[in-house]
């Protein structure tokens, strides 16, 4: 799809992705308007950039629009979509819009995977920008280095996350495609893990034959993926083109490691973000930047200066001396990795608050969720964040907490209001309150710190 329309109206413009795409379109000279159901800082910031926004719906903007774009979270019954269809307006999804924008650039870099996409994309962005390259960046998290989640560049590189949900990433035909990992998720759409794997295979074959497919050699399913493009592999345990050895975590949990390319040592990296899993993100990011023409020496300042993305192991504050850390982890594998990291730097008890994200994911990965909290001392399950979904009978935060308790872990279910009253009386210095989830549970993390200053 080519964007040859001048007025673009976005339904669901408050989303982290569509808000960034709105900024990119506006910078290219398009007239952009948008509506969303929920007031937010994102809507406020868009107004600062000259993008008009309103809450709920706007008939006038729909009538004037040449193109109407919608988020996957928006129901077909939204008034603006209903009117757009009645007026026979051109309508497209967020994914198609992203694909159309990407096609404007000779070199699209698309980062895919069940998890790690945002961090890896942000690492690449910081390396390129620090090395005085001028990429256009679209990332799914707030990056302090860019003061947001979008950067409008002047070069030929477009850097973006490539989300697999509803096969969105198949709208892209990147010059560089990265596959960080492939693990069961979004089974409400894919139905089977085999279908999900097949989508990643299709993504790999959509990469430009003159480009590069970058694959995690240590991930069983990613490592099976083939591509018509030049393939580069990265890893720690399996033989790969670029590898990390002598990994050592410092007192902050940040990994240092030696980098080898085709078996030859090229240098040492000391990351400023915690977690051994970040080594994989760093290796993939290094691969991409080298493929774009950067030397290891040029990559190093940006990579070592990378301090993370908001809601990715973010220190929020303290409550009675106990640290409050928030993380976006909402998949069992992400949760296990985050708990391992937090446990390694916590001297006291590790209290975990988890908000499941969507009823379907909770149902499909039920047994994994029940078993992934082994390293926590206590677990509290908050009400499920529904996102785009309706409740599923029997799938509740209470039933999940009961199942975790039955599995042998101290667990309970509480509302946010109950937790705000509960934890200040429980936590002690040297404890950690780890708040996990991709929904609005971040508000709890900030509230409990603010009310106990």
Image (cartoon, grey):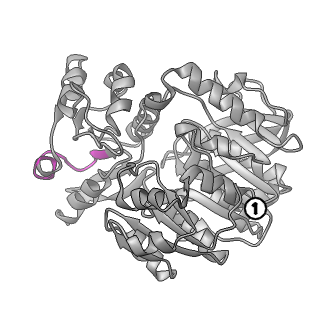
Question: In this rendering, is residue 296 above or below 181?
Answer: below
Q: Residue at x 22, y 56 (%)?
A: 319
290 lies left or right of 391 = right
Query: Is residue 89 one of those drawn in magenta?
Result: no
Q: Residue at x 35, y 19 (%)?
A: 367
Q: Residue 397 lies in what quarter of the image?
A: top left
Query: What span is colored magenta in the figure?
Result: 418-434
Q: Position of residue 233 (x, y in %)?
A: 77, 33
Query: Is residue 421 one of those drawn in magenta?
Result: yes
Question: In this rendering, is residue 121 above or below 31?
Answer: above
| Front position in the image: 89 or 353 | 89
Is residue 409 in view from this perspective? Answer: no
Q: Residues within 10 Å of mark 1 (few under 14, many from 20)?
A: some
Image quarter of the N terminus: bottom right
Is residue 107 in view from this perspective? Answer: yes
User: Which residue does the numbered mark 1 point to in the structure image?
Assistant: 104
Which secondary structure lies at badge 1? Answer: loop
| Front position in the image: 315 or 368 | 368
Hey, which residue is sitting farthest top in the picture?
Answer: 407
């Amino acid at each position: 799809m080519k964007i040859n329309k001048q007025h673009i109206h976005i339904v669901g413009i408050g989303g982290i992705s569509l808000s960034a795409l709105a900024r990119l379109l506006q910078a290219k000279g398009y007239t952009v308007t948008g509506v969303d159901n929920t007031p937010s800082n994102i809507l406020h910031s868009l107004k600062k950039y000259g993008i008009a926004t309103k809450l709920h719906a706007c008939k006038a903007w729909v009538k004037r629009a040449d193109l109407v774009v919608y988020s996957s979270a928006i129901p077909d019954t939204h008034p603006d979509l209903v009117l757009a269809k009645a007026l026979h307006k051109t309508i497209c999804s967020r994914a198609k819009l992203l694909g159309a924008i990407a096609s404007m650039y000779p070199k699209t870099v698309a980062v895919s995977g069940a998890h790690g996409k945002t961090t890896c994309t942000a690492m690449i962005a910081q390396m390129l920008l620090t090395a005085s390259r001028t990429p256009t960046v679209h990332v799914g998290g707030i990056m302090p280095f860019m003061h947001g989640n979008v950067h409008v560049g002047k070069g030929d590189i477009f850097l973006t996350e490539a989300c697999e949900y509803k096969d969105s990433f198949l709208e892209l035909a990147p010059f560089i495609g990265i596959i960080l990992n492939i693990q069961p998720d979004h089974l409400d759409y894919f139905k089977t893990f085999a279908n999900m794997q097949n989508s990643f295979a299709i993504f790999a074959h959509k990469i430009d034959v003159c480009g590069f497919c970058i694959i995690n050699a240590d991930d069983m399913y990613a490592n099976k993926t083939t591509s018509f493009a030049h393939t580069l592999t990265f890893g720690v345990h399996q033989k790969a083109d670029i590898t990390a050895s002598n990994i050592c975590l410092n007192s902050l949990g940040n990994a240092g490691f030696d980098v080898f390319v085709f078996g030859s040592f090229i240098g040492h990296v000391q990351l400023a973000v915690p977690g051994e899993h970040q080594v994989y993100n760093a290796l993939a990011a290094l691969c991409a930047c080298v493929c774009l023409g950067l030397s290891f020496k040029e990559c190093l300042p940006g990579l070592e200066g990378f301090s993370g993305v908001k809601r990715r192991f973010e220190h929020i504050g303290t409550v009675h001396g106990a640290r409050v850390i928030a993380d976006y982890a909402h998949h069992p594998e992400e949760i296990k990795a985050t708990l391992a990291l937090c446990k390694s730097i916590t001297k006291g008890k590790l209290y975990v608050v988890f908000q499941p994200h969507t009823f379907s994911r909770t149902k499909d990965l039920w047994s994994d969720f029940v078993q992934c909290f082994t390293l926590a001392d206590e677990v509290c399950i908050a009400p499920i964040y529904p996102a785009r979904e309706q409740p599923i009978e029997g799938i509740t935060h209470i039933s999940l907490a009961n199942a975790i308790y039955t599995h042998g872990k101290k667990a309970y279910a509480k509302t946010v209001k109950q937790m705000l009253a509960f934890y200040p009386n429980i936590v002690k210095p040297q404890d950690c309150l780890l708040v996990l989830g991709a929904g609005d549970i971040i508000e709890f993390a900030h509230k409990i710190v603010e009310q106990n200053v």
